[in-house]
Amino acid sequence: MQSLQSVNEFVIKFANVNGTGSASANNLFAKAIFRMGVPVCPKNIFPSNIQGLPTWYEVRVSERGYLGRRGGVDIMLSVNPQSMPQDIREVEPGGYFIYDNTKPLDLRLVRNDVNIIGLPLTRICNDEYKDPRQRQLFKNVIYVGALAALLDMDFAVLTGLVSDQFKGKDKLILPNIHALELGYQYAKENFACPIGVRVRTADKVGDKVLLDGNTALGLGAIYGGATVAAWYPITPSTSVVDAYEKYAKRLRIDPGTGRKNYAIVQAEDELAAIGMVVGASWNGARAFTATSGPGLSLMAEFLGLAYFAEIPTVLFDVQRAGPSTGMPTRTQQSDILAAAYASHGDTKQVLLFPSTPKECFDFGALSFDLAERLQTPIILMTDLDLGMNDNMSEPLEWDDERRYDRGKVLNAEDLDRMERFGRYLDVDGDGICYRTIPGTHPEKGAFFTRGTSRDEYAVYTERGEEYAKNMQRLLAKWETIKEWVPKPIEQDCGQDTDTAVLYFGTSEESAREALDYLAEDGLRINAMRVRAFPFNRDVEAFLERHERVFVIEQNRDAQLRTLLMAEFELGPDKLKSVLCYDGTPISARNIRQQILQQMPGHNVTPLRRDRLVSAAGE
Amino acid sequence: MSYQIPKFRHPDLPVNELGYTRADYEGAISTLCAGCGHDSISGSIVRACHELNLEPHRIAKLSGIGCSSKAPTYFLGKSHGFNSVHGRMPSVVTGAAMGNRDLLYLGVSGDGDTASIGMGQFAHAIRRNLNMVYIVMNNGCYGLTKGQDSATADEGSASKKGDPNPFSAIDLPGLALQLGATFVARSFSGDKGQLVPLIKAAMSHRGFALIDVVSPCVTFNNNAGSTKSYEFVREHAEATGTVDFVPMREEITAHYAPGTGTEVTLHDGSVLHLEKLDEELDPFDRLSAMVAIEKHRAAGEILTGLIYIDKDSRDLHDVLETSRRPLNTLTEEDLCPGNKVLANINSSLR
């Protein structure tokens, strides 16, 4: 058997039982690689459950800097008998299957084309610890220690991390280091270390940080000046408000009075959560809510009100697999259409598509400026993959000269100078009108905010021409919005080509890697990452320049493609779909395969053996 | 359409301390049916605000959907208004109140808007003791959709169509007490003498103040057989006692016989004088209030007046310990921690 040989380029997957403390041990492993200067991307694949079901943690290690899912597993560390048959099947030929051999491996599972390494984790723990909880927790730390030996990792980095992690709980440091050593020693004494796959200290991480998108969003809301957060708990968005609260407690306490410069209200449901955001924003405070698919459905009515009454509203949608309850702990990009046209009647909503934690922070803060400038809901569309996983990211930055853009708001002096205030009067011709904040002026500027039709002076009317005029103005505003939202990012392949890919959000890393694979296959194509809806003119020009555009997205119905077709009145031939909707992030191999299959005249067998996730999913 | 009331006024109309006449607190001409109870309530709101010397632009009036929710157009024309979505006014007020604690929030709702589609939000606004006045214009039916029974229609009560309502009624004051409301009152749209001081007291209360106002629907629910008709309510209303409201700084001039009343000083310094009629009701005791409501209900009577008050209540801002400066007045200097702090956060993520 040819064993896999690789330095700093591999995929390792941990198969655990949830609720056993494996997450922090696995995180310790990933962070150690990051601290060794090697780019890393861990992904948590977890059940909608608190204790007892299978959970996985997949870590991509790539000195070349590929941070998406590649596809396939080189090393499987399996400590969950429940999922063992599936786990061993996933290992690449020549790869490694590491398991707890306190109980012997079921002979029917044995594969001759993988290296099988047994670590008696349970036995070591039973010998070492009396307390059952300790036996369980340290088992995880012991296998991390063993991996350090097997993969030739820098042991000092691990002990340093443990010391950092338990700072303030110092009496936990030594027992954890001891557990690491137990695993390390066992592996050293019983196997030829290192194995074919290993980690070597590098300098490819630079000043990057390891951060999840939800924390970055929470920080974006802090820096963006949000003072009111209203929300209803829902996976995978909950940690957005958790992060906002964590940092607000630290950074938003008034130094003089000790009182809070923020208010967080846990609402009774998502309808109330978005209603509170609308109310606070109407009153001139920056406010936001965070939710996921089911919450978005419930918020639709208020989103229509905010669109029509033109109330700044910020909503972070951390998408998960739908429809209905779907797979609540698995990722997807499947709320695109529901968000873009949220609510009954003619509505169009502004969407932002970040693809890194840095962009979560930047777009998160930007959402509040855009909402006030454009006086409409801003729906930031992230997903579970970006939101809940640690991603390697550019460090966060803030320009201290930056001022919040409060948009067109009239103060008392402005009103004094005016003859008559018209809330829905398009004075500047850009479709955006001036608004007033309640309580501004004793005599002027008060108006009735309503979801019913009204004239330019906010007076209720059922006259068709007044209604139509207002709807037309909202379309004019839609054109203005295209100039304000983040522009797409193009990547030119440097060669004449009529083929391109277009993607958004978390497909980026895998798409970038797939494009490199395709270049190796001899297929060079251009790429565009879309960062907002409405699409601006650059997107239209890009589509016009190419005969064939593959739209990569993580849903079944090719929702972004539908949006492109609808907005640009394109025929279906031009846009091809590359899809993944099995709840896992799309992989580079999968993208390559789907593109090759759809290329005219191409009939290429994959260069690498792949665990194919076909267009139909698994 | 809404029509403006002519601006011409009698020159001798009395002005309040701010120099405003009562007309300055009025809104557009009502488009509700002639004789609608809701218009009387609007009139009481106008009078209460005028007499309390409130600055109209420091009041925000918010509503949901329905006849009642149209009413805010017809009073306080200088105030910002928000006609939101059906049953969701409490959440909009919650956000608004979080954003600016210094305005007076007046929520206007109906029995459908509150007791059916908006039941959840009503209940949770009470639980949070949101600092607002919540007036239910309660006519027991859906007016705008032509007279269907609502959830507050009494069992056996018949609307204009004639069929008796087969379902039990939701009693909003009783429910509010159970949910922890800190100010609960009920009145009748036709009884301004009682309603005006109740509104004034509610506006001076810190926390959630509910006034359930029985307000007959002249078009669909004012017939014989209805328990929300003018005639029925006049005959069956049982007042807890008389209420007199004395705003802060104003001398108490009315004369009360010793031992007949109770005086309550509210958080803003104003004083409530309660003249007791119902011997068994202690309006400072929640349990006594709940018992009184149920007793009168069992007797087929509608208990009106101030039913319960907790004058030391803590509102949502007190609970959350938010800044005393309204959150909507804070700027970058107060809110944005700056790049240096961010650099430290970056370091913690490596």
Image (cartoon, coloured by chain):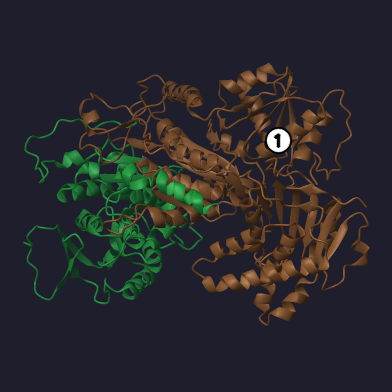
Chain colours: A brown, B green
Direction from residue A189 to residue A267 in the image, left or right: left
Q: Residue at x 41, y 23 (%)?
A: A466
Instruction: Check the image and report above or below for B21 versus B286.
Output: above
For label 1, the crowd category at 10 Å Cα-Cα, with few meaning under 14, some 14 to 19 and many 20 or more, is many
Left or right of B189 on screen, residue A358: right
Q: Position of residue A119 (x, y in %)?
A: 80, 68
Q: Is residue A341 visible?
A: no
**Rendering coords of residue A495 (x, y %):** 72, 19
Instruction: Classify residue A382 as left or right of residue A411.
Output: right
User: Taking B330 as reference, is B129 above or below it?
Assistant: below
Q: Residue at x 47, y 44 (%)?
A: A220
Q: Nearer the viewer, residue B287 or A23?
A: A23
Residue A22 location, quadrant? bottom right
Secondary structure at numbered mark 1? helix
Q: Chain of mark 1?
A: A
Q: Residue furthest bottom?
A: A130
Work out whether residue A115 or residue B14 is closer to the camera in this orientation and state it.
Answer: A115
Work out whether residue A195 can be spotted: yes
Q: Nearer the viewer, residue A270 or B310?
A: A270
- Residue B176: x percent and y percent? 38, 64
Number of marks drawn: 1
Q: Which residue is mark 1?
A: A511
Please, what is the three-letter code of the amino acid marked with disc 1? Ala
In the rendered image, residue A40, in percent from the top left (x then y), is placed at: 66, 48
Q: Quadrant of residue B316?
A: bottom left
